[in-house]
Every structure is written in structure tokens, then in C-alpha cells.
Amino acid sequence: MAAISVKDIFKIGVGPSSSHTMGPWKAALLFLKQVDESGFLEKACEIEITLWNSLAKTGLGHGTDIGIMLGLSGEDFATIDHKTINQKIDKIKAEKEIVLLGKKPVPFDLKKHLIFQMKLNEAKHPNQIDFKIKTTSEEGRFLEDSYYSVGGGFVESEKKTIEKDKGKKAFPYPIEKAIDIIGYHLKEKLEIDEIILANELSYLTQNEVEDYVEKVIDAMVGSIYDGCHTKGVLPGGLNVVRRAYDLNKKLLKDQKYSNQEEWISLLKKQPRDFRLITKFISCFALAVNEVNAGMGRIVTSPTNGAAGVIPAVFMYYHCFINPKMTLEEKMAFFLVASEIGSLFKKNASISAASGGCQAEIGVSSSMAAAGLTKVLGGDIGQVLMAAEIAMEHHLGMTCDPIKGLVQIPCIERNSMGAMKAITASEIALNSEPSKAVVKLDDVIKTMWDTAKDMNIKYKETAEGGLAINIPINIVEC
């Protein structure tokens, strides 16, 4: 298994889905870069994309079509001004033309060139995208490849043409399972965050790691602030009203502030009242996922659909437990959380299309519980125990998004995941890990076994659960 970094788990991007928006977006970019490097991009005359299984069933609700068009255009989800997305997409639709990688214009009619293949189980992967490009060259008449969006913005290529990790060496402490972390701790006398940092420093400098963690925090806090200060109805036709705006206003009792810095300062001065703090935690999580549903700027944590859990738990600690949180503590929180996410990525899945919502909200809750436990002073056993407890109580959670949108039940589930993470942390901090019956590796295996047994209709197809049982008058997009 390839080395997975904190930069891989926490990707700065846009909503609403890491597997259905960012993954296809990245796949389109990678495919065209291969075509360009082969010298055929300038000879391209037509392109066709086919979406399979979950991508086909819920792609429109998840913005898969938008992600692909932006990827084909050469846009980067980490840097694009998300406020310009609608304008760019409207231009492509109106002109029925797309400029591949910003270099080569070709005809592009959504109905003709982007095919939603609705028959389930006829592809090799639940999130499969087939790309086929036609050129004027006899040598490369047709160029094609299949990509799999495997969750969290990660993609794999059937022809193994994924770009190599630039500069990433083998980690000095390769970790496949949680037991490996314990082994290094006992042998090297290193704490869990020290082990993970040593791996990061094998290809990044200390400043680069610190700078990236700070960028992630800035993006997360920014998404909370944006969500708490944006009102209205979310797009997509479900008529879901944004709630974070009113909740934030109610909780702060109309206290005045003029920017994000003053808002955070005000949060830190709030009474340490249990009910008030739990309401803020829910507000933070709701805010992020309302931004995500509106195709705003968020951070995969480890996915977009679960992007609100870790920011909410981080803000809980930063605002209400330790307002003077140091950079060292921030590093520990995110390094530990990222490693837990990588364990699930390596041994199970972080994609709802493969594992149901347990693979998204469950994993994010597990990550948040571990990070929180570390900064609260937990030892390595308690950190891993907290991660195990959080996932144990998400086992079997299905993914049944109404109309394929990352809104119901996704937005509220982030609040639930955040609260479970905090509860799991408190239980672990007051327990003796050596006496625990269930270990983290056990629960990861159990999650994957459960995922494989889960009926496909509960894996992000909008063909089961709430998606078919809610008698709601849905307005077309």
C-alpha cells in the first residue's frame, strides 16, 4: 500500500462530494494530462464520458457533471474560485463547447457526450468513469481509460496511469494496521504524533507540514464562518433551508462583531454551559456541510460528505477547552486524525459507494475522536481506543441520500458524528485500553465485512432507505 500523507487525507477542495465531484474532476484532469503528454491533445476532435453505478445514479445530485466539466477544462479544485463555477458551467452549456485543459476546444453537448449508465453492477467499480477521446490522428484514433473514484478525492486508473507521488519516499515507519503504531511506540519510545510526523518529514520539511496544517485549519474555520453567515435555501430542489445562520445568531444573542477573527474571539468568551456548547458543536458541523452542499470551499475530512465532523470537534477544543491551543497541539490533532483515516483507507474504505455512510461519517468520527483524545492528554492506547469506539457505534450506517443530494440525511449526520467523537474520547480517557475487548484493527475489519455484506441499494444509489420512503414534493433542478 502506498504511503498516505496528511496532505492526502485532508484535501482542500469544493463540495458537494469528494467521491462524486472531486474524484471525477481529478480523473478528468489526469486523463487529459496523459493525452496531452502523448501528443494527441491538439488532435482531439471529440470526447465521451460514461458514468457507472453510484456515479450514474446520484451524479447529478452530487455535481459529478460539473466536476467533470471543470476537470476537462483544466481547473484545479484546490485553487478555483468556487464563486465562479456556475458562470464557467453556464458558458460550456450555452456554447456546447469545452476547451480541453484550456488549450483545445471540442464540441460538448451534455446529453451526447456525458452518458449516465443506469444499469447497476455492469462495471468493475461502484464509482467508475470511462473516458474516450477521438482524435484526427490515425496513430491514436481513439484513446481511452477507466478511472475509479475510491473516496476522499482519491482516484485509481484501470491502466495504472495515475501520476506518481512527487518526491514521496517510503516512510521510515510504514503503517498498515493500528498494531504497527503500538509496535513503533514500544520499540522507539515515540508518541503516536511523533511517529506520524517522522513519516511526513521523510519527504516534507517541518515548515511545510506546519504550513499545510495551518492551511487546512484556515479552510475549515473559513467554511464554518461562511456557513454561519450565509442564509437561504440550498440548491437542488429539496428546499432545504440553511440553519447555521439562524442558530449562530441565536446562540450569540446578536452580539456584534465585524469579521472572522472577532467572531472566534467572541466564541472563546462564551459561558462553559453544557447545552450551549453542544449547540455550538452542532452549529459548526451544520455550517460546514451547508457550505459543502452549496458547492463551496471545504476540506475532505476524509470526505466532503463528512467534512463537518472534524472541524466541529476541533473548534470544540479550540474555543471551549483550550482557547490558547498551540501549533504543536494543532499538529498533533491533525496528524493523529489523518493516520486513523489512512488506516480505514488502507484496510476498508472511505467511500459511501463502497461501504455506506459508515465509511464516511463513521471514519470521520473515528478520526476526530482520536485527534481530540491526543490533545486532551490521552496515551496511545486511549487514542486508538477512542477511534475504535467512535467507529463501533457507526457500524452498518447506510448511505441513502434523498435525490442523490448531499443534504438529507448527510448534513445532520455530521452533527451526530461530532457528538459521538467527543463521547468516544471521554469514554476512552476514562478507560484502561489494555482491558478493551475490541481493538481498532478489529473494528476496521468488521466495518469492511459489513460493507461487503450491505445491499448495493444502500451504497449512495438513492434507491433505498430515506431516498425512497420520504413522500416529499421535490422540485426539479
Image (cartoon, rainbow, N blue to C red):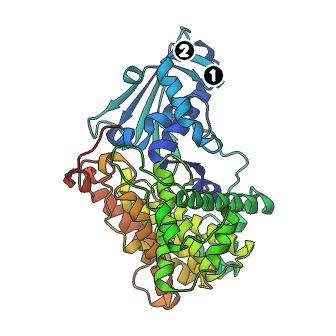
Q: Quarter of the image holding residue 352?
A: bottom left
Q: Which mark is residue 140?
A: 2
Amino acid on which the number 1 mark rests in the picture: Ser
**138 or 382: nearer the viewer:** 382
Question: In the picture, which quadrant includes the N terminus?
Answer: bottom right
Q: Which residue is drawn at 37% across and 53% down?
A: 240
User: Is 101 drawn above or below residue 296 in the view shown?
Assistant: above
Label 1: which secondary element: loop
Q: Where is residue 52 in the image (x, y as percent from the top left)?
A: 35, 36
Residue shown at 53% from the left, 8% from the top: 138
In this rendering, position of residue 144 left or right of residue 322:
left
Residue pictured at 44% horizontal, 64% vertical: 414
Residue under label 1:
38
Towards the viewer: 409 or 445: 409
Q: Position of residue 9 (x, y in %)?
A: 57, 57
Query: Can residue 346 be spotted in the picture?
Result: no
Position in image of residue 157 (x %, y %): 50, 38
Looking at the rendered structure, the kind of residue marked 2 is Gly
Q: Eyeballing the image, is 414 above or below 406?
A: below
> Do the residues bearing badges 2 and 1 touch, measured as CB atoms within 8 Å?
yes
Q: Is residue 326 left or right of residue 16?
A: right
Neighbours of disc 2 within 10 Å: few (<14), some (14-19), many (20+): some
Q: Would you say residue 424 is visible in this rendering?
A: yes
Distance Cα–Cα, label 2 vs label 1: 9 Å
| Depth check, front residue: 259 or 468 | 259
Q: Quadrant for the C terminus, please.
A: top left
Instruction: Where is residue 235? Give x, y as percent.
Output: 41, 44
The image quadrant of residue 237 is top left
